[in-house]
Image: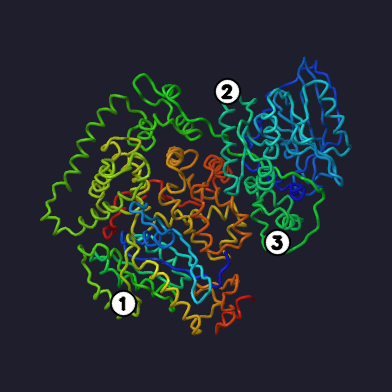
Amino acid sequence: MLESEVHDLSDDADYAASQQQGSASMMLRSDSTKNSLREDAEIVFTKENVAIHPTQFASERISGRLKLIKQNSSLFMTWIPYKGNSSEARLSDDERNLYTIKAVSFTEIRSIRRHTPALAWPYIIVVLSSGLAYPPLYFYSGGVKEFLATIKQHVLLVRSEEDANVFLVNDFQNTLQRTLSSLELPRAVPIACGPSNLSVDESVLNENQGRADNDVNNGSFSAAQFHGRPSHKVDPARDLSINVLEKFSLVTKFARETTSQLFRENHSNGFSERRTHAQTNLDHHPRKSSHVEEKTSDESCVALDSQEFDNLSLVWGKPRQPPLGSGEWIIFLDSEGRVTDSEALRKRVFYGGLDHELRNEVWSLLLGYYPYESTYAEREFQKSVKKSEYENIKNQWQSISSAQAKRFTKFRERKGLIEKDVVRTDRSIPFYEGDDNPNVNILRDILLTYSFYNFDLGYCQGMSDLLSPILFVMDDESEAFWCFVALMERLGPNFNRDQNGMHSQLFALSKLVELLDSPLHNYFKQRDCLNYFFCFRWILIQFKREFEYEKTMRLWEVLWTHYPSEHLHLYLCVAILNRYRGKIIREEMDFDTLLKFINELSGHIDLDANLRDAEALCICAGENGAACIPPGTPPSLPVDDGSFYALQDEIL
Amino acid sequence: MSYAYLFKYIIIGDTGVGKSCLLLQFTDKRFQPVHDLTIGVEFGARMITIDNKPIKLQIWDTAGQESFRSITRSYYRGAAGALLVYDITRRETFNHLASWLEDARQHANANMTIMLIGNKCDLAHRRAVSTEEGEQFAKEHGLIFMEASAKTAQNVEEAFIKTAATIYKKIQDGVFDVSNESYGIKVGYGGIPGPSGGRDGPSAAAGGCCS
């Protein structure tokens, strides 16, 4: 069975360390902590020597006591690590405490998966309704059966029809759902910092699954957080293996320093073993342990201590939410239309995006065209003022006679280029479809007007890609123009003739990968790929060509919140690259192959899952991440205001 | 799919001359007038047969705008062939050929085969560059030359294949060390030997192809 070949607990190691590294505020928010047991609770089951493994080495374990407690008619599970066990001295109390399970109610548990490998300790994985799981609990003194039997006495526990080792808790659903529920298991991930569900799908094949995953998340988040059941179709055989193999990528790297300090001495075997067998993009190594990098596939190594460790990754990015709808939107506004708490709004949009009908109103705020504190009336007023301002600038080029144009090469060239490009921009989108589509002409007019508004920058390919969704959303020439202007305030440097905006972002990206994914960085370095040109298109036009239209709009509004970072797009690059790292390295891609591979990811990137990863990376990189990004790197506003495009007048 | 050789091509030239359309015509045998403009680079591939040997062409279609030149230059690396395209109806695209050529000479390997293509020859009524001028330019710079139309498919197949034949000839003549991939040539495993036996070629390459 595939999963038995993939034994690696490094994720858990990183988990531990990462918790230390600065996510403390998040870590105690796990679902279980909110329950507190009263004195009258009755202990119905106790098992000593139940351990978790924070690393991939069996010697690194945290032992504790597992209990089932009944209070009134509810059953709870607790697992408390022992204090100060000398054989586990390397682990601090803090670390131990991270894993403590404080009274999780069985109403929150979806299922328990039992693993009884022949040559290793039996263990269970407890999966919550939210789709999350605790790290595997190893029964060093046996007792899994007894544990399950006890549960059965108190709550409804049924064996999954799909997998005899999966026991569904309180499962009243129909057979289909039960089946699907069991399929959720391998995708489940231990809880770190809140309910979420990380689906790490490396392959295109798995894309649908990733999406389905998100559906589950979205559906279960607000209304039925702890009872969300998957309702999607999956291909069991495929998903089981893919998920088991591929779900790990992200978290382990967050905490590399601490982890490597803790466990540096004995890594290498485990990792090459894992690469050899698992063939996944499993996570690798702490930044400081580059000595393992060279160890790739050709070694056969000592097997790990335990033969059947599920590779469970941690959850970091919060679950994506449903888009902000009009009912909720008005809550953010005062009676005169001011956004009272722009931070809260940005946060909300960051996590869920916007219903399409709200985009028109909210994009202009996110982009900074209208101030958050403006009233309805002020916005109306600004709209009319700006409209006439737009018409004035537009008139500047419209009034150029053909005789004048003959002596105005630059104008002719720009106009020619723009005219060539607008007819090659999103013509498959109904809004721009068909011959003589007026919207295509508006696209042209806005771009030409922009080239007069910012003559130094002018027009450059890629701008039409950025404008197209804005015009589609604003559906008003002047408003679209000014929103585009606002966007170009930040992204203009992407189109500088000397490409300095692009180079600074690609540079920052390389630094972030170095920080967050050193194996990949080292690989790129070795392959002379550190220019990151393969991410050029991603960055130039904010992933516009990588997602379908609707997803692009979703991504943009998320990015434009600048929450939690102005440079989330760079973390998104890291997240996506990380997801395919295993493949990139395994297939020994050179620059050409890599470029082609990245290009062909277009349309196959799971936006929500990668956004979660990006957020997680961003938060975990913290100040170190921010330090990778030089001041003024787009989309930050330029540092030296004024002559930013002074040298750009060669541009068309 | 197996191949005896893989050749990397790059298509360069001003924006809007029809680079992507040439590629699409060659790989998909269709003309799509509203193709999205190319950002960065796009890829296409097709198998052809030369001298009974299956040859895979991997074609890089680049963005034409001046501002992307610094990026485009990185794509030259390891290209065995280049299609340098201009638009016979737009004089300026012809005038810019020298600068494209300079880029190519500077950033590609010296033995890269360059095919000059005057595209859009179906629009003869709007012609702004004569065939003779194209020929002349090609002659002066040692390029192969053809006028073609991505729209009608005229000479498209020929342009790509003739370039490949030239590269193949260079291999036969020992111009390339095919084991050095910086020439833009990869030696494949040949797949099924051709009807002629597959081993009868004069080539050092054939001998080396399975090592």
Is there any visible trace of residue A133 in the rendered image?
yes
Kindly state the secondary structure of the residue where label 3 is placed. Answer: loop
Pointer 3 local density, CA inside 10 Å: few below 14, some 14–19, many at least 20: some
- Residue at mark 1 to residue at mark 2: CA–CA distance: 70 Å
What residue would you read off at disc 3? Answer: A297
Q: Nearer the viewer, mark 1 or mark 2?
A: 1
Mark 2 belongs to chain: A
Which residue is identified by label 1? B138
The quadrant holding residue A211 is: top right
Same chain shared by disc 1 and disc 3: no
Report the side of A545 relative to A522 (left or right). Answer: left
Marks 1 and 3, Cα distance to the nearest angstrom? 49 Å
Splitting the image into 4 quarters, where does residue B118 fall?
Answer: bottom left
Which amino acid type is shown beneath numbered disc 2?
Ala
Mark drawn on residue A399: none
Quadrant of the drawing holding the C terminus of chain A: bottom left
Is the residue A30 above or below the residue A513 in the image?
A: above
Tag 2 residue: A223
- Are there few (<14), some (14-19), or many (20+) residues within 10 Å of tag 2? few
Chain containing mark 3 = A
